[in-house]
Image (cartoon, coloured by chain):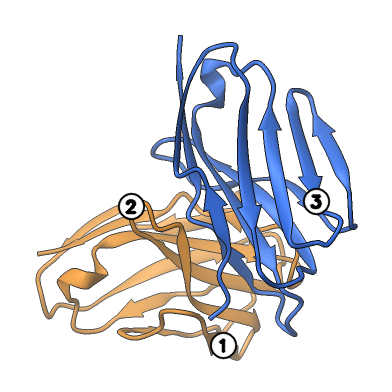
Chain colours: A blue, B orange
Amino acid sequence: GQQVMQIPQYQHVQEGEDFTTYCNSSTTLSNIQWYKQRPGGHPVFLIQLVKSGEVKKQKRLTFQFGEAKKNSSLHITATQTTDVGTYFCAVDYGGSQGNLIFGKGTKLSVKP
Amino acid sequence: NAGVTQTPKFRILKIGQSMTLQCTQDMNHNYMYWYRQDPGMGLKLIYYSVGAGITDKGEVPNGYNVSRSTTEDFPLRLELAAPSQTSVYFCASSYQGGEKLFFGSGTQLSVL
């Protein structure tokens, strides 16, 4: 079946450092969503990207959708301990049901 | 609104036992989903429903059954539990396919 590659699997940073996670597909995407899951919690929706080359910002978080709509990134500027968790991308290939395929996630730890 | 409510939060089953994981949402969402999450593996879609009376298989449906008799409820049935079904189960809903998902708090299931 269709898969999406998310890298890195783990990232350990010092508080104040930047962080980026990448999501790559071999197939053109209809749209991509990003979720955050705190330790012991459930995934929470962050954002959806639909347009080619789209860039969206939420405070210290910057989300990009590639020009070819095959990849995306989430960048966090100046990480804080509250950013700890696992970040997942979820891709929609545009099927009739709109089911999302989740990446394996990037687990972020932040050392104070 | 309570959002998506899952019960129970924790459960231990013996091999061969059966159980039903309950999921209800009060957002009048058409789509509902069941995912399982294994460590480091992201979320895998088990079953989904696009509306009352309609269900369909996801990526990993074997060993599970679902029903959708009402818009609000989407129970997941495990028959003859096996150790391979030890996982965290999340129910989710969305208004339409391809839109953002709202997740329940999850059920941690161990089969011993």
Tell me: B65 left or right of B112: right
Residue ID for mark 2: B39
- Callout in the foreground (1, 3): 3
Asked whether B110 or A69 is in front, the reply is: A69
Residue B22 at x, y percent in the picture:
42, 67
Residue type beneath disc 2: Pro
The answer to whether residue A85 of the structure is visible from this angle is yes
Q: Chain of mark 1?
A: B
Q: Is residue B1 visible?
A: no
- Place of residue A92 in the rendered image (x, y in percent of width and height, measured from the top left): 71, 69
> Callout 1: 10 Å neighbours few (<14), some, many (20+)?
some
Picture coordinates of residue A38 (x, y %)?
48, 36
- Which is more foreground, mark 2 or mark 3? 3
Element at label 3: strand
Percent from the top left, x then y, of residue B76?
40, 75
Mark 3, other Cα within 10 Å: few <14 / some 14–19 / many ≥20: many
Chain of the residue on which disc 2 is drawn: B
Q: Earlier in the sequence, mark 2 or mark 1?
A: 2
Q: Which mark is residue B38?
A: none
Q: Nearer the viewer, residue A19 or B107?
A: A19
Name which residue lies at 80% across and 51% down.
Answer: A65
Label 2, residues with CA under 10 Å away: few <14, some 14-19, many ≥20: few
* Distance CA(mark 2)–CA(mark 3): 27 Å
Q: Quadrant of residue A90?
A: bottom right
Vertical position of residue B10 compared to residue B83: above or below: above
The residue where tag 1 is placed is: B55
Q: Residue at x 67, y 63 (%)?
A: A91
Residue on which disc 3 sits = A65
Distance between mark 1 and mark 3 Cα atoms: 32 Å
**Vertical placement of B83 versus B110: above or below?**
below
**Which residue type does callout 1 highlight?**
Thr
